[in-house]
Amino acid sequence: MLSVSLCLTTQGGERYIPADKAASVREQRVVYDYSQAYESQHPTEFLAHFTVGYKINRNRLAHEFSLKMINVTGSEEFGRYFYNSRTGGIEENRSAVSIPGISYKIEF
């Protein structure tokens, strides 16, 4: 039996505390502006996960092989703010993690 699945997800829109850029440059570290806490939102992100599987059924035993790929779209997620001493400014740390996975399962 061959199986294919696709999972589409929209997530995000989390509210956050913005960095105070002027104070951060002055202090050379990230300073958050708590007077505007949770007024802004990160944009919504679109994620796709994909799985292809192959199952072999036998008497009293089944074997299943599958290949999974998480975050096929390579959507970047916000991590944190950091102070960049080279540029003297505040930058966002964003990362896109795509994770492949191969699995084998025996059912008896």
Image (cartoon, rainbow, N blue to C red):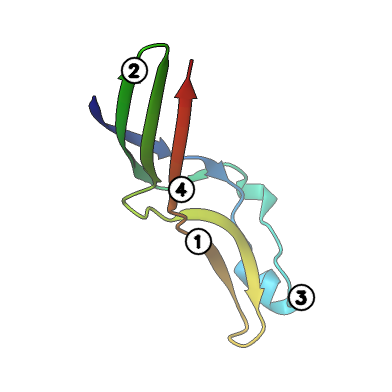
Helix, strand, or loop for circle 4? loop
Q: Nearer the viewer, residue 77 or 6?
A: 6
- Judge depth for marks 3 and 1 and give the one in front: 1
Q: Earlier in the sequence, mark 1 or mark 2?
A: 2
Q: Distance between the residues labelled 1 and 2?
A: 47 Å
Q: Which residue is drawn at 69% across and 70% down?
A: 23
Give the image location of residue 95, x and y in percent. Answer: 49, 60
Q: Distance between the residues labelled 3 and 1?
A: 23 Å
Q: Is residue 85 left or right of residue 98?
A: right
User: Amino acid type of disc 1?
Assistant: Arg
Which numbered tag is attached to residue 58? 2
Vertical comparison of 71 with 25: above or below: above
User: Amino acid type of disc 2?
Assistant: Arg
Q: Quadrant of residue 102?
A: top left
- Judge depth for marks 3 and 2 and give the one in front: 2
> Residue most toward the right?
27
- Residue ID for mark 1: 94
Q: Which of marks 3 and 2 is nearer the N terminus?
A: 3
> Residue most toward the front?
59
- Residue ID for mark 4: 42
Helix, strand, or loop for circle 3? helix
